[in-house]
Amino acid sequence: MAPYSKPEAVLKQAEGLVSVGQMHAALQSLTEMFSSKRFRSAPLASLEPIMLRFIELCVDMRKGRTAKEGLMQYKNIAQNSSVASIEVVINRFIKLADAKVQEAQEKAEKAVALTDVDDLEASETPESILLGAVSGDQSKDRTDRALVTPWLKFLWESYRTALETLKNNARLESIYQQIAQQAFRFCLKHQRKVEFRRLCETLRLHLANVAKYAHQTHSINLSDPDTLQRHLDTRFAQLNASVELELWQEAFRSVEDVHNLLTMAKKAPRPAMMANYYEKLTRIFLMSGNALYHAAAWSRYYAIVTAMGGKSEEELSRLAGQVLVSALAVPVGSQGEESVAEEGRGKTARLTALLGLTKTPTRTGLLKDALARNVLKLSPQSVKELYNILEVTFDPHSLCSSVEPLLKALPSDSTYALYIPLLQRALLSRLLSQLSQVYSTINVSTLLELAAPIRDLGLEDTKVYDDEQIEAYVMGCARRGELNVRVDHAEGTITFVDNPFAGIEDPSSSMSMVTSGAVQPSTSEFVRMRLSSLASCLHNSLTTLYPPASLSEEEQQASFAALVAAAQAERKALQLRRAIVARRRELLSELSVRKEKEEASRRAELSRLEKEKESRKAMEDLRKKEVERARREIENIRNEEARKLAQSLKEKGTLKVDIDDMENISTDNLMRLQVEQLAKEKKELSERMRIAAKRLDHVERAYRKEERPMLAKDYELQQESDKDAFEAAQKSRLEAHRLAYQRDMETKKRLARMMSDYQVKKQEVMSKQKEEFQRRQELAQKKIAEEKAKRRATILNQREEERLRLEEEERIEREKEEEEQRQEAERIAEEERRLAEEEAERAQLEAKKREEEEARAAAVRKREEERAAAMEQVRRQQQREEEALERQRARAAERSKPAAPTAAPAPVRAPVSTETWRRSAAAPPPASPRPRAATPPRSESPAPVPKYRPGALGGGWRAREAAKKESDLGGTATPRAASPAPKAPAAAPALAPAPAKEEPSKEDGFQTVEKKPVWRPRRGRF
């Protein structure tokens, strides 16, 4: 294997080989790259150009198998990362092959058009006549076979290769369906019916293998609505193509494929798709001659078309007439009750399922359905008259004669022309049905006379019913159970058998043709319905003799209400039962789908294991067989070589062996025996040659000794004979020359008389040829001049058209530019207007914002003024309290002066509770000048209550002891105040902590009122 190279280098090398004409070498280099293991790790961006070039070389050289291998390799690499790249390569492959086919067709047409004809007067040459007699083909057919057919075959192989490459892969499903529809169009374009059948079989095989490859990574899931819809579209395209190619069996198989896919769909398909489905079914059933299911298909198609709407009155009228005529064309009694009871069997069940019906259709049911859909009113007048004659009136004597003009008028419309043979059969069945209801026995001649108007209508594509065919039709109806008759050929009569117990003895012998639209009941029906008729009569008699008592209005209303309630209850129960049944059906369907999936996966796994086991066993057997075969081949080769050697030696006579005993003699033994025999024979030969040479030497010496005296005499005789022979030859040669000269002179004299005539004829011929040459030369010159003039006029016209086109383009471009400028100006104006509006809105917003800010600033000023007023009020209140405290202190000092006039004022103990021993007993400090009022805390952030600290009020236990000693020495005790004095404002700065930092005011429109400090005793507080 060649060393791995970069993809770009391989592509460049291939391009170089193609440029020098070595296409095989270029293709081989690209193929070797695909076989490399490192090919899988190369990036797709560099592999796609190589793949496209590889495809082009394969198409140019018609290497379909090589292209298939390359596409498979590329699909395995690109399917996980770039599906679009695979689509590009496949489409390129198909496009190149199609282009080659078109090119070949053009070459074939040119080859047929430019065929050289030597003789313009002769329509065919001898060679063409002989070739046409041998091959039977025309020259175009032979040219197509030589030029077009190989490329057509290659294009077909390209489609098959593409489908095989893209099959059973969910990621490549869309391109797969696209290629399949292109293949359908190929078969339609070239009328390839055999290839179309093979294509349909291939698609069915791929669809059948979906469950087989369900375990793969990118397997197809038919439960996906999009995937199923793509398959349905492809099958409908297949159905349309098969109908256009008139492959009716393949069309029926396509219908079955479509029906199988429709049963798998979870949602209903599009109405247009189903209309196409039923329309194709009508053509298939019509070609097969099945009038009943043809009419049923038309009924389904009409129901869908009327539900869709969108049809004109003329189209609806034609369609309604076709539906009614197809129902009337069904023979009377072609589907009896027994056939309906056996609808689950065989072909009938399949056809019923294809139409989506729950039971087998009947002629009566189809007509009732058509009348319920208002088909009779929309049908043409001729179809209405045909319906009245066949279904309304009862006159077997004038039935055929009344219908004859209608049947002759119907073919004027191509829509109804195909129904004439079916209507003839339907008329025969209707005639026999009406005759069986009126007569028990009828002459054959009378029947033929009544059916004479419709036996031969004298129209194209209509059947001529002779006497034997009518009799065969009657016996066919009897065999199918549609009519119970006996034919007496001796008397020439037909007897309609009406056995009253026929339905009991033989249920299959019921006459559906008679019971369909009977005027009077038959004997068997009379016997069967006798008891029921008697019971009805007795019931009516009792009702007349003993009429039931009439109910009162209240009882009637009560009974009616009970009936309504019962009906409602039954309706609810029915709805509940339907819901339960529907839910059970859904659960069963889900369970069945789950079971099918599990079963499919289990079968796939089992099949995979079995296949692996079989493959391993097959490989082992193959290996053993290969070893055994190699051993036998070696042994056979050795035996064959020994046998050939022995045979050759035996033929040469150098070996004396028996070929039958060759199994015991090897090649080495043969060679040894051959060498021994050759040595022995050589020795014997040399001995014989020595003896023979000695004998020959003695004989030759004796001969020469005897002939020596006779040589001189023999030489003289030889000279004399040679001289006589030479003289005779000279004499004969001279005589021959003289006679030839005389003949030539006589010929010259005879031809000399014709020389003048020859010269005249030569001049005449030369002059005629010269005149013909001059005439043709003048015609050629004239034709050349005309062609030049035409060419000159064409060029001028083209230039003028080009000038007009350029002017028109310039005008359009100019108008376009003007329109763009106008739009640009409008856009600019609109932009300016929008900017102006935005500026105005911005100005309004700014003004509004300024107003709000001014209002907010006014509110802030107002709050500040209120706060300043509150602070002023607090300051005045504090000042009044300080003044009151000073006056109280002055009064206390005045009261303490008479008790100790000479002693110093003792400190007054502050009132201390029994619980708080840490409070100082020292007297309050002397009055000091009134301090400046402290600024009260802001209303937004009230100051916290200060925590008690020991020694904060001054003194301690030492101060208390000193005060006690002083009082003992003085003899008097300072009376304790009843209650502690209010807290001095001057001490507030010492006791209270620094005011907290002012919080930013919140612009919420509210003012926080400060909490005034209130004194509370500490006694009893913990």
Image: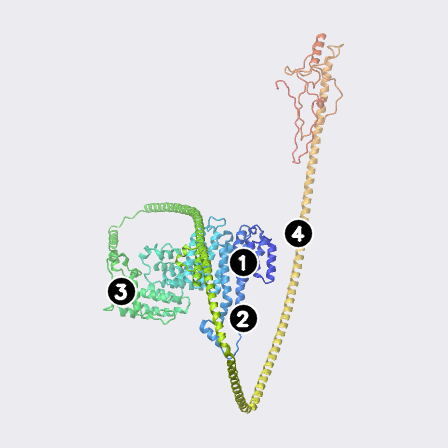
User: Could you tell which of marks 4 and 3 lies nearer the N-terminus?
Assistant: 3
Q: Earlier in the sequence, mark 3 or mark 1?
A: 1
Closer to the eye: label 3 or 1? 1
Task: Say if 890 sits above or below 396 in the image.
Answer: above
Q: CA distance from mark 4 to mark 3?
A: 95 Å
Amino acid on which disc 1 is placed = Asn
Q: Which residue is mark 3?
A: 438
Please say whether residue 204 is visible from this viewpoint: no
Instruction: Name the front one of labels 4 and 3.
Output: 3
For label 1, the residue is: 91
Q: Position of residue 53 (x, y in %)?
A: 57, 58
Question: What secondary structure is found at the residue carrying circle 4?
Answer: helix
Q: Quadrant of residue 331?
A: bottom left
Q: In the rendered picture of this protein, how many numbered marks are placed on residues?
A: 4
Task: Mark 1 vs mark 4: give the one in front.
Answer: 1
Q: Residues within 10 Å of mark 2 (few under 14, many from 20)?
A: few
Which mark lies nearer to you, 2 or 3? 2
